[in-house]
Image: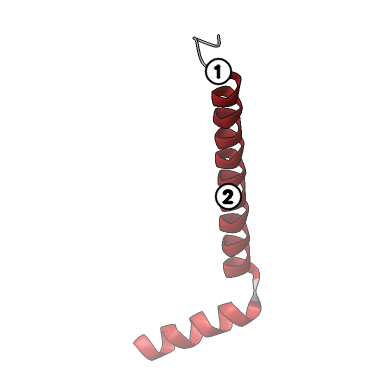
């Protein structure tokens, strides 16, 4: 499946794919942590409750 590409091109493509997968993984973990902190952190919940009171 090399399709006439040189070893350097294949290695470069593999490195780009690995970097992309790592970036996606980091983004998913970061999004999960932000979501978890927003829903479970009492300090954040208290601030949200105060904002809700101010808006009323």
Residue 31 versus residue 26: which sits nearer the camera? 26
Q: Quadrant of the C terminus?
A: bottom left
The percent coordinates of residue 4 (x first, y second) are 50, 10
Question: Residues at badges 1 and 2 in contact (C-beta under 8 Å)?
Answer: no
Q: In which quarter of the image is residue 22?
A: top right
Mark 2 residue crowding within 10 angstroms, few (<14) / some (14–19) / many (20+): few
The percent coordinates of residue 38 (x first, y second) are 57, 69
Residue 56 versus residue 18: which sits nearer the camera? 18
Q: How many labels does the image show?
A: 2
Residue 34 versus residue 38: which sits nearer the camera? 34
Q: Which residue is drawn at 42% across and 88% down?
A: 53
The percent coordinates of residue 14 (x first, y second) are 60, 29
Q: How far apart are marks 1 and 2 (CA)?
A: 33 Å
Q: Residue at x 65, y 74 (%)?
A: 41
Residue topped by disc 1: 6
Q: Residue at x 55, y 18 (%)?
A: 6
Residue 30 versus residue 7: which sits nearer the camera? 7
């Amino acid at each position: 499946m090399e399709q006439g590409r040189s070893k350097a091109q294949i290695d470069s493509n593999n490195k780009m794919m690995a970097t992309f997968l790592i970036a996606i993984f980091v983004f998913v973990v970061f999004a999960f942590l932000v979501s978890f902190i927003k829903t479970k952190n009492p300090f954040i919940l208290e601030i949200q409750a105060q904002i809700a009171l101010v808006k009323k």
